[in-house]
Image: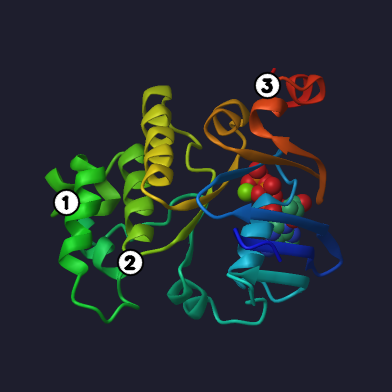
Amino acid sequence: MQKDVLLEVENLHVYYGVIHAVKGISFKVLKGSIVTIIGANGAGKTSTLKAIMNLIRQKKGKVLYKGKDISKEGTHNIVKMGLTLVPEGRHVFPNLTVLENLLLGAYLRKDDEIEKDLEYVYYLFPRLKERKHQKAGTLSGGEQQMLAIARALMSRPECIMMDEPSLGLAPIIVKQIFDIIVKLKEEGKTILLVEQNAFQALKVSDYAYVMETGKIVLEGKSKDLLNDKRVKEAYLG
Ligand SMILES: Nc1ncnc2c1ncn2[C@@H]1O[C@H](COP(=O)(O)OP(=O)(O)OP(=O)(O)O)[C@@H](O)[C@H]1O
Ligand SMILES: [Mg+2]
């Protein structure tokens, strides 16, 4: 394993009963980079992220985080090791306040720096600070996505996986979300970004994989894929 590889997936398969959703994919995420997986509906992107977090039972293959095989590790241990997932569809707790949602993101931690990290996420998302006592269910879609990202940050991850963070958001909010993703990288985080918004994802990322029906069909530097004829035709309209 290369020294600067933070996350590595080797020959991953995911099954739902007889459905073979992910068919033996392999990829790497280098420390400090943004890697994206793009692909159409049903390609197997969410299944891949869930399998990495060990949220799916029927799977095969190896997942290495910091060189350690985590494929049989409990999800909470994976989070403790510094790898976290912002799930598709946000999933904030609607009846809890913004602050309560954020504190839940830190529940596995035992250190005394939670206050400091709250200040950090409020600095990244001033909107959440203004609304810290508001029920999460009454936030706008964009604010809920910000809260979902902020909550993940409260576990102090080194590597953050995000599943379609821009889905269903207005263009101006989409831009804010992608700006935050770039900022997180600048602050030293490593990001694995799953997106259907291929154009934005390729613009902010360093390296990209294209998934189709459970397989990786193309990979390369994001700036090269932005100009790739096949990618342009299939994903960039
Ligand atoms: N719980 C499940 N039971 C049965 N099949 C499932 C289940 N979850 C996903 N699948 C199937 O697995 C395949 C891959 O789904 P997945 O959600 O990973 O795709 P995706 O790339 O994330 O798509 P999208 O862009 O629409 O979110 C699809 O054919 C889907 O119907
Ligand atoms: Mg999905």
Left or right of residue 194: residue 145: left
Residues at marks 3 and 2, CA–CA distance in whole angstroms: 35 Å
Q: Is residue 223 above or below residue 113?
A: above
Q: Position of residue 177 (x, y in %)?
A: 40, 36
Question: What's the amino acid at mark 3?
Answer: Leu
Which residue in the structure is indicated by mark 2? 105
Which mark sits nearer the N-terminus, 3 or 2? 2
Please name the residue shown 35% across and 58% down the image.
153
Q: Position of residue 55 (x, y in %)?
A: 60, 71
Count neighbours of disc 3 (C-alpha within 10 A) and say few if under 14, some if 14 to 19, many if 20 or more: some
Residue under circle 3?
A: 236
Which quadrant: the C terminus? top right
* 1 or 3: mark nearer the eye: 3
**Residue name at image x 27 percent, y 82 percent:** 110
Amino acid bearing label 1: Gln
The reply to whether the C-beta atoms of the residues labelled 3 and 2 are less than 8 Å apart is: no
**Comes first in the chain, label 1 or label 2:** 2
* In the displayed structure image, the side of residue 57 where residue 112 appears, left or right: left
